[in-house]
Amino acid sequence: MNHISAAVFSSNIPLTRLDVAAGTVQSVIEALNEGRISEAVGQFADQFLLTDHALGLEFTEKERLIDFFRTSREVFPNTVVRVVSIFHSEDAVVTEWELTASHNESNGNMPYRVPISFSGVSIVHVRDGRIVRWSDFYDQLTSRRFSMASLFKDWIEY
């Protein structure tokens, strides 16, 4: 079971419930974990920005984001993101998470599966129940996801 907690970003605004913004973020993570990529991306506004700071990638188009998530699942099968905590205030959500996955590698003719586990943080802004900005922060080397960046570098949108 996920540990959900509310943060107080202003001392005079007590938050004690999982609000709409945090619920939206949680539903995107759950959909991605279950491979329902189109449903997850459907939670994004028509105009949005998703930035993966570790890989140096930015996405502003839903079709490209869908391709990114699908490719990520192909390269890293069995990916699961477990929410450690969610802190929120109005339309801002900070999520601490742990990702586990596997990656197929080879040493000469010997293929093997490498387990991957790393932690990260996402900062998300939600407006009218839709995600308008999502930023992921994690260690690129620990994640072993640097190969993903090369697949999408020509997709960086300015």
Image (spheres, grey):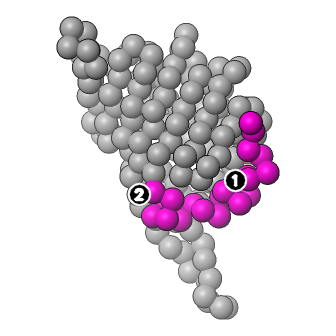
Q: Is residue 35 above or below residue 42?
A: below
Q: Which amino acid type is shown beneath numbered disc 2?
A: Phe
* Relative to 140, 148 lies left or right: right
Question: Which residue is painted at 52% across and 37% down in the image?
Answer: 135
Q: Is residue 90 magenta?
A: no
Would residue 17 be seen by someone viewing this image from the given angle? yes
Q: Position of residue 113 (x, y in %)?
A: 54, 75
The image quadrant where one finds the N terminus is top left
Question: Which residue is painted at 28% across and 20% down in the image?
Answer: 9
Question: Which residue is painted at 27% across and 23% down in the image?
Answer: 6
Question: Which residue is painted at 65% across and 46% down in the image?
Answer: 57
Q: Which mark is residue 71?
A: 1
Foreground tag (1 vs 2): 2
Q: Is residue 5 above or below residue 154?
A: above
Q: Is residue 141 magenta?
A: yes
Q: Which amino acid type is shown beneath numbered disc 1?
A: Thr
The residue tagged with tag 1: helix, strand or loop? helix
* Relative to 46, 43 lies left or right: left
Q: Position of residue 130 (x, y in %)?
A: 58, 18
Magenta residues, as a range? Answer: 139-158
Whichever of labels 1 and 2 marks the residue nearer the N terminus, that label is 1
Q: Position of residue 92 (x, y in %)?
A: 43, 21
Judge by depth and name the residue closer to the eye, 30 or 44.
44
Label 2 sits on residue: 118
Residue found at the far bottom of this picture: 109
Q: Which mark is residue 91?
A: none
Would residue 83 be seen by someone viewing this image from the given angle? no
